Image: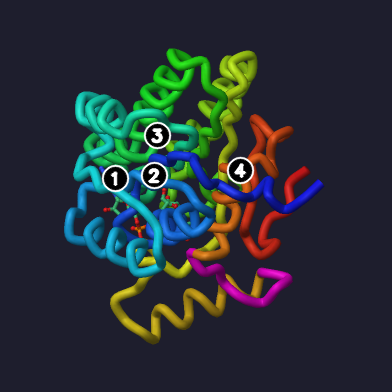
Amino acid sequence: MSLTAYDLTGRSAFITGAAGGIGRAGAILLAAAGATVHCADRDEKGLLETRNLIAEAGGTSHIHTLDVTDPGRIKAAVAAAGNLDILAAVAGIMHTSSVLETADDDLDRVLSVNFKGVLYACQEVARSMIARGAPGSLITMASGAVDAASPGLLCYSAAKAAVVQLTKTLATELGPHSIRVNAVAPGWIRTPMTARHDAEQQQRAEATMARISPLGRVGEPEDVAHTLVYLASDASAFMTGQILRPNGGVAMPW
Ligand SMILES: NC(=O)c1ccc[n+]([C@@H]2O[C@H](COP(=O)([O-])OP(=O)(O)OC[C@H]3O[C@@H](n4cnc5c(N)ncnc54)[C@H](O)[C@@H]3O)[C@@H](O)[C@H]2O)c1
């Protein structure tokens, strides 16, 4: 046994949402672990910044500007990336509205990005792995919202619950191809998604979340990035169909 199981040297990873927040931290850490990282996002400026940060740390990356809701663009980017060993489908959006005020358009938009965007990436990367007869690791992004109901989060939590079911179903279908599929369900992480316009409001929101964590703090993108590297690597070779929860202990499901 050795820690080389965490080494991603020679592996190639495709990560969506890589222009900021958790996706950027994941891209940087996957590259630090040795992977060549294909960073995808709709935010080109953010992607260029991520590429620079990876290069400054001595890593290798390529960028793909795309919208994850466009299956044609995903297909083309995955084909351009070549032989992939790892997918981290991180891109996502937040939306809040009460159930009674939820409009059709809002539901469609959130399902489109947070569920279909993950589905398209999983489909394309898995197809390319199967065609090569290569093993691989697919990682999807759920949320602590699947563990506890919150007012206003119907669209978001329904899409994330769908991601969990996609993950488990895919794990059963892709296991025979030696492709593992796992989800990450983070708690409150300090990123642009959870940033509040007002600093005082921000502090209050974080203090509330920190109070319900046994660790007494909210998370940082790096907390989730380490989970991504673990799931990407051979260190998690016997893990599939699982939900990992870097959430500071705010929820402890069986
Ligand atoms: N921050 C948290 O507390 C938290 C908690 C649980 C789960 N998550 C999940 O983690 C993931 C990353 O969240 P984050 O906090 O880093 O958010 P973020 O807003 O900082 O980053 C999301 C990234 O996704 C990209 N993106 C959004 N829609 C896209 C689209 N249609 N096509 C391509 N790229 C798109 C954005 O440009 C951005 O770079 C999301 O799926 C989110 O739901 C976040």
Between circles 1 and 4, the one closer to the viewer is 4
Nearer-the-camera pick, 54 or 148 = 54
Which residue is drawn at the image coordinates 37% and 30% (left, top)? 121
Between circles 4 and 3, the one closer to the viewer is 4
Nearer-the-camera pick, 162 or 78 = 78
| Mark 1 CB lies closer than 8 A to ligand 1 | yes
Which residue is drawn at the image coordinates 51% and 76% (left, top)? 206
Which residue is drawn at the image coordinates 43% and 49% (left, top)? 153
The percent position of residue 45, horizontal first and vertical second, equals: 18, 60
Q: Which residue is mark 2?
A: 15
Query: Is 247 drawn above or below residue 129 in the view shown?
Result: below
Residue that protrudes farthest toward the right in the picture: 1
Within the magenta stretch, is there residue 120? Answer: no
Q: Which residues are magenta?
A: 213-221
Between circles 3 and 1, the one closer to the viewer is 1
Specify the amino acid type for callout 4: Ser
Between circles 4 and 2, the one closer to the viewer is 4
Specify the amino acid type for callout 1: Ala
Label of residue 40 in the image = 1
Spatial CA distance of label 4 from label 3 is: 20 Å
The percent position of residue 2, horizontal first and vertical second, equals: 77, 50
Q: Which residue is mark 4?
A: 233
Dot 4 or dot 2, earlier in sequence: 2
Please report contact status of discs 4 and 2: CB closer than 8 Å, yes or no: no
Quadrant for the C terminus, please.
top right
Q: Which residue is mark 3?
A: 118
| Mark 4 CB lies closer than 8 A to ligand 1 | no
Dot 2 or dot 3, earlier in sequence: 2
Element under label 1? strand
